Amino acid sequence: MKLTRLQLKNFRLHNDTICEFSEHLNFIAGGNGQGKTTILEAIYYLCTTKSMGGASDYEAVTFERENFDIKGLFTELTENEVRVFYDNSIKKKHLFIDNKQFHRASRIIGMFPVVTLTQSDHAITLGSPSDRRKFIDSVISQASKTYLKDLIDFNKILRQRSLLLNQIKETNNKQLFSQLDAWTENLINRGTEIVKHRFEFFSRFNDYLNTAYNKIMQGSEKPEIVYTFLESTEPNKIEELYRNRLDELRDAELRRTTNLVGPHRDDFHFLINGFELKKYGSQGQHKTFQIALRFGEFFYLKDALSKTPMFLLDDVFGELDTFRAMQISSYLGEVGQAFITMTDFTKYDFLNRSELDRIFKVEQGIVKTNV
């Protein structure tokens, strides 16, 4: 899958921008606050209908304008025009694919897969368990519509069950316990499916992670992701373990009015040569692991979906040593099309480039090509 054309109207600094992209590497250079990352954000919007940095839609509208409009032309075996239009006056976003409106954003997840490599990826290895869950869920959700539906359903069940726990504590109404039992059963059913998906994912993804890490570090270190659910690594015991633990914590959940156990509290352990990365890893190992996760994600999604994802790299070369930067630059040759932002293109003579690549210079929302 390639993105050949992008049009932005009233999107942050870009009043009316059109980019014609190379099918290979697209280098987007510009100073801070000039609008280069906005181009990546627009591509991410087309693939997910959401902001890459988690900002609200109204923040992306150009100052003193009422809406933004993003259009992109994707090509694979066929062409698809994707459009995201946001109207600030009614606080509503519209998604169109080939002029047909889609009313549920979840419909697009996986249709136009996207992988991002940004400086904020440090949270995946250094941050909280929720940061790691967010990463894992985003990868599996793009590869599996079933997982995405299970995740959406599970989160709805969590909210309903939490409300019911609160209601029981406030009213002491014993008749509500039968409702709690029903929601608990739903929780176990959906949660068990999510955990099984995660076990299956890691059984495959570790190979992709290893390959990516070795491309960067030339086989000197072995990365691994270890996942256990309630101290178990056996998928066939998930439902029984989950049910037993919920029985054990029933009183505690009623007292604290919260869901204390399940895949929403999972953590994933990142290891280098058998040692936990978060405790013992150097800054360079953390950065390499983060980059390997994204390259692994790219090739995993490519194989799982038989589609080539969009690959967005936001100002990552500036914080790498020359060795890692050169290895990553070389690795990008296996990706195909990618979109890479940087503040000063002249500093990166070591980058592997070809005549088929394209350079964009962005200044105050104005884009010039092959400068």
Image (spheres, rainbow, N blue to C red):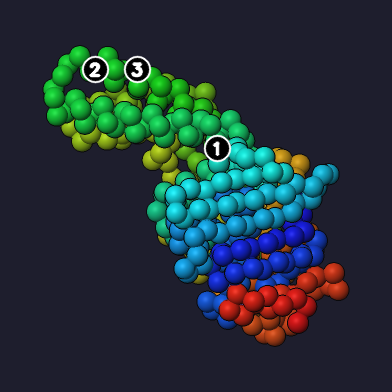
Q: Amino acid at mark 2?
A: Phe
3 vs 316, nearest the viewer: 3
Q: Amino acid at mark 1?
A: Arg
**Residue 104 tag number:** 1
What residue does disc 3 label? 182
Is residue 145 in view from this perspective?
yes
Query: Can I make out residue 288 in this image?
Result: no
Disc 2 versus disc 1: nearer the observer: 1
Q: What distance separates the C-alpha of mark 3 from that of mark 1?
A: 28 Å
- The residue located at (45%, 22%) in the rendering is 189
User: Label 3 vs label 2: CA separation?
Assistant: 9 Å
Q: Amino acid at mark 3?
A: Ala
SS of the residue at dot 3?
helix
Upstream in sequence: badge 2 or badge 1: 1
Residue at the farthest right position: 355
- The first of marks 3 and 2 along the sequence is 2
Residue 81, percent from left and from top: 72, 49
Asked whether disc 3 touches disc 2, contact meaning CB atoms under 8 Å apart, the reply is: no
Residue topped by disc 2: 177
Q: Residue at x 56, y 38 (%)?
A: 103
Q: Which mark is residue 336?
A: none
Q: Position of residue 228 (x, y in %)?
A: 47, 38
Compared to 137, does 200 lie above or below? Answer: above
Mark-to-mark CA distance, 2 and 1: 34 Å
Name the residue rendered at 67%, 55% in the picture. Answer: 71
Residue 44 vs 153, above or below: the answer is below
Q: Are marks 3 and 1 in contact (CB under 8 Å)?
A: no
